[in-house]
Amino acid sequence: MDMLITYDVNTETKEGRRRLYRVAQVCKKYGQRVQLSVFECSVNEAKLEQLRSDLLRIINKEEDSLRIYRLFGSRQDCLESYGIDRYVDFSGPMVV
């Protein structure tokens, strides 16, 4: 299933900047960054549970925001993109 992960981490403190870095690192394990605090991920239910658990251990619910959107249908069916789109389709043929 395709997911959109968005987050806003309070970076006014050193701990907040550390959380921001850690959230991005976790998201990179499951998908790819499409904007600064936005990742597109393709995961199954088990991976989604692990992703959610990993992120909830990092964020501070009093200061930060985390949103997980399920995209019903394919990425192409759910997305209108204008301007720079650095998305790479890893499921298709790759030229090295």
Image (cartoon, rainbow, N blue to C red):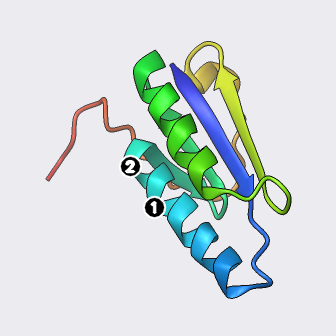
Q: Is residue 87 visible?
A: no
Residue 52 drawn above or below residue 7? above
Mark 2–mark 1 distance (CA, rounded to whole Å): 7 Å
Residue 3 pos. (x, y %): 59, 30
Q: Which mark is residue 29?
A: 2
Residue 49 pos. (x, y %): 51, 27
Q: At numbered mark 1, what does the secondary structure look like: helix, strand or loop?
A: helix
Question: In the rendered structure, which amino acid carries the disc numbered 1?
Answer: Gln
Q: Residue at x 69, y 35 (%)?
A: 68
Residue 63 placement: quadrant: bottom right
Mark 2 touches mark 1? (CB < 8 Å):
yes
Q: Residue at x 72, y 54 (%)?
A: 7
Mark 2 closeness class: few <14, some 14–19, many ≥20 residues within 10 Å:
few
11 left or right of 93 in image: right
Quick one: 68 or 53, which is closer to the camera?
53
Q: Residue at x 58, y 25 (%)?
A: 76
The residue where tag 1 is placed is 25
Question: In the rendered structure, which amino acid carries the disc numbered 2?
Answer: Lys
Mark 1 closeness class: few <14, some 14–19, many ≥20 residues within 10 Å:
few
Residue 51 pos. (x, y %): 50, 38
Q: Residue at x 31, y 30 (%)?
A: 91
Q: At numbered mark 2, what does the secondary structure look like: helix, strand or loop?
A: helix
Residue 90 placement: quadrant: top left
65 left or right of 85 in image: right
Residue 70 drawn above or below residue 40? above
Q: Which mark is residue 35?
A: none
